Image: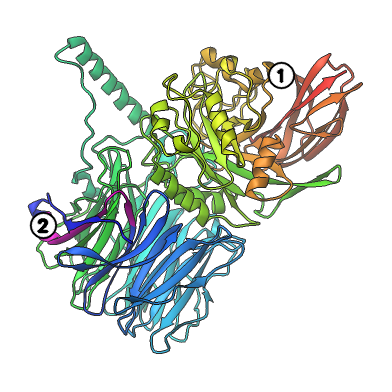
Amino acid sequence: MIRPALLSLAFGLSAFSQELLPQHVHLQPEGSWADFPALTTAKDGTPWVAYVQWDGKDDSLYVAKLAGGALQMVQSLGQGIIHQPAIATDGKGDVHVIWSQVNDKNLMELHTAVVHEGVLGDIFVLATSPNGGNAFAKAATDASGKVWLVWQGMRGKLADVFCRVFDPAKGEWSAEIQITHDAAGDWEPCVAFAGDAAWVLFDSSRGNEFNIYAAPISADLKVGETKQLIATDRYEGRVSAVGAKDGKGIWLACERGNQQWGLDMRAHGHPQGLNGRKDTVIAYLDLASGKVEELPNPDALFAELPGPQPMQPGGPRGNNPKAKAKAEQQAKAKAAKDKEVGRAAANEVAAVNVPHIMLDSAGRPWLTVRYFKSYAWRLALTRYDAATKQWTKPYAIPDSVYSQDRQTAHVLGKDGSLWIAWPSDGRTSKLQLNTGIHLAKVATDLEVPLVAASESKPRVPFPAYINAVTPERAQDDRHTWTHDGVTYKLYWGDYHRHTDVSNCITANDGCVLEQFRYAWDMGKLDTLGTSDHTDIAKIYTPYEWWLNQKLVDVFYSPGFFMSMYAYEREQKWPYGHRNIVFAQRGGPIVYIQRKNYLASPWQQLFPVKTEGTPELHPTELWDVLTRYGKPVTAISHTGATSMGTDWDQIPPIDHRVENVLEIFQGARVSYEGLNAPQPTVGMREGEPYNHASTVIGKPVVGEPIRSFTEKNNGVYQHALELGHKLGVWADSDHISTHTSYGGVYVKDFTREGIIEGLNARRTIAATDKIFVEFTCSGKLLGTEIAVTGKPVLKFSIDGTASIKRVTLVRNEQNYHQWEPNTLKAAETFTDEAPLPGENRYYLRVEQTDGNMAWSSPVWAQVK
């Protein structure tokens, strides 16, 4: 049963917004979160909203209708792990609700149910597959009353677009129609009706970049030729579309981002992120000519709109002149740093996202856009005037503050009423609050002044790379290694990618969905875990953790892609950040601050001491993860920075749950050791190393960094020297893409198999998919062995470019080197003079194109 809820008209609106949105209704369940609204109107014109509600344990799917100035619940459609519903009304007036839900195989499948005159019919499965999810459903009703459903299916390969149609005259759904068959990924479809066809629009990574495409489907359900609609050298995705009133064309809107989106990028400024430098694209497809005309976009007009409620930082006490001067100095320093990294000021628009286009009864296009200011996104509403090619003065929709990845829903009723719905948590900082649903009627006949949008400034291309770009390996080019009768396969992952949930680079890192777009189609990874921060400056709430885990469920594709559940515990130096990676959903967030963990639901399950230091020590983290008792691993952050670990201050590591560390991050540099070579892949002309530490002098790109000064204790070789037995890994962290590949040799390509491989240290770190095999006296990388006599080292390398140098490192010293200058290299080397006791061997690989790789060590105890 639905919980008691506040279902009321929203108050506190400005006079203008009350005129433009004269009926504004707010649904806020008490003690729960209502999110992801979808919208339709029943046959009597009443708005109905489908939404997902989370009670702290499970999702429930509800349908509510507008009655008596409030949203009243009509039906509950079940519980579980539910993703993004769709809703539509057929020609007979029956309401169809479609949603994705996790089944007993941990896969998202599409469910549907019909509400007939308020009575819920049977729930049944519309789409399911054994090797991937079915999600991102969108539904719409054509002029004949048929309901068209489109969605994205991940079925053991890159995504395709699918469709089914419900015919109310027959009372049944059509067979499944596969709209796309290409090798590239096809994403987030929508459907629009124009001419005598239904048009399915989507974006696709064909050509190794995302652009907008459309495919027509005839009345007899035959799929026509796919057409490319919008394609520049920049990212274009997340399309919204609606058929023109006269049926002669389609209005569409999408996002446009950076060039080389998701390709080689090191982190040298916020605009380089997956959500960096986004523009709104609005266009019209004329069916007769096939031409697509881009219209003036309204982005510049959003600059004058208000952001969210200003955060109130604590000011200097009283009238203390020194405190005031210090505060002013800090403000100036922050402003200078913001300018340096490209971070927008609090009053500037830092991002625009998920434009949603709709028509009023006169056929005029209206647009909502999420724009970011200060610390959150807010919705803007405006209308395009085709006669003057101007926009109405946009205004900020009240009570619309929220995160990046939330779409507006709309419906045009038979009486000509245009209704919109959206979610908001009303946040007053970056902290997630309880989310509610908003519904409003747009006063489309209200006179709103027209304003001319200034032309968008051309984007200055990023500087050229300092290295030639090496062609990628094919996605299915996998490395297999059989050793001692056991076959291992090498899979590539990244478990350190931030989203808009994190406190740091909220506007430009990109949402969770964009991280999976990158991982699947551009990074061509095999496994990903997004790693938002736990509780420094902002708490990672249980609801945010639930939402992110839900996207992990969406992109779980057995045999093809292992999405993992992860977060970053950002404990500062000397203890260091750690990325925690789980094989199963529901793992505990082990907050850094003791007070935060004590107040969390996990204290009841895995209690820690109520008294102690303000921050939980790493030993307490390891203890909680061990008591958790399911497959998990902790990966330590690159070391020689304020985010790293002073290995002198860390007790013996609990190897039940921690076994590898980041030797390299694409966001920064390699922290292998002092004077160790640095990879230069992804570096551009004029860019310095982003070493994030105090160094001696100004390092020259392409040359080693001599010293990290007070953070020297954090380098990998120092950890080895002290006896910490840690393998290597590579991750991206903020902004960076396509230059960080953590490789793990697994016996079984499952989530549990990946954790086993990580904890066994069968790992390599690389900046590209460089295949590396390494053994010592017949034992695999990552192992501890006893050797009588002389250790025999053997390696085999399959590079992506010519291999410039292979270095065998013994006890943190360059011991032997080869310079093959070939694509592949293999050697057997006997250490004729091993040291008494422990000999720690690992490989470093350097290519001529600036790419590098490292193997995990073998620890050989020589007798």
* Disc 1 packing (10 Å; few <14; some 14–19; many ≥20): some
Q: Name the residue that disc number 2 marks.
A: 18
In this view, 740 is above or below 160: above
Q: Quadrant of the C terminus?
A: top right
- Image quadrant in which you'd find residue 280: bottom left
Q: Left or right: 845 with respect to 631? A: right
Question: Which residue shows up at 25% across the image and 80% down it?
Answer: 43
Q: Is 837 in the magenta?
A: no
Q: Nearer the viewer, residue 643 or 210?
A: 643
* Disc 2 packing (10 Å; few <14; some 14–19; many ≥20): some
Compare marks 2 and 1 and give the one earlier in the sequence.
Answer: 2
State if disc 1 and disc 2 touch (CB < 8 Å).
Answer: no
Q: Nearer the viewer, residue 39 or 794?
A: 39
In this view, 152 is above or below 484: below
Question: What scheme was used to colour the molecule?
Answer: rainbow
Q: Quadrant of the N terminus?
A: bottom left
The x and y percentages for residue 691 are 51, 24
- Image quadrant in which you'd find residue 762: top right
Element class at badge 1: loop
What label does residue 405 carry, if any? none
Element class at badge 2: helix
Q: Nearer the viewer, residue 595 or 577?
A: 595
Magenta span: 17-35
User: Can I make out residue 329 in this image?
Assistant: yes
Question: Which residue shows up at 33% across the image and 42% down it?
Answer: 432
Q: Is 28 in the magenta?
A: yes
The x and y percentages for residue 246 are 27, 80
Q: Nearer the viewer, residue 371 or 820?
A: 371
**As shown in the figure, which amino acid type bears the numbered disc 1?**
Glu
Q: Name the residue that disc number 1 marks.
A: 812
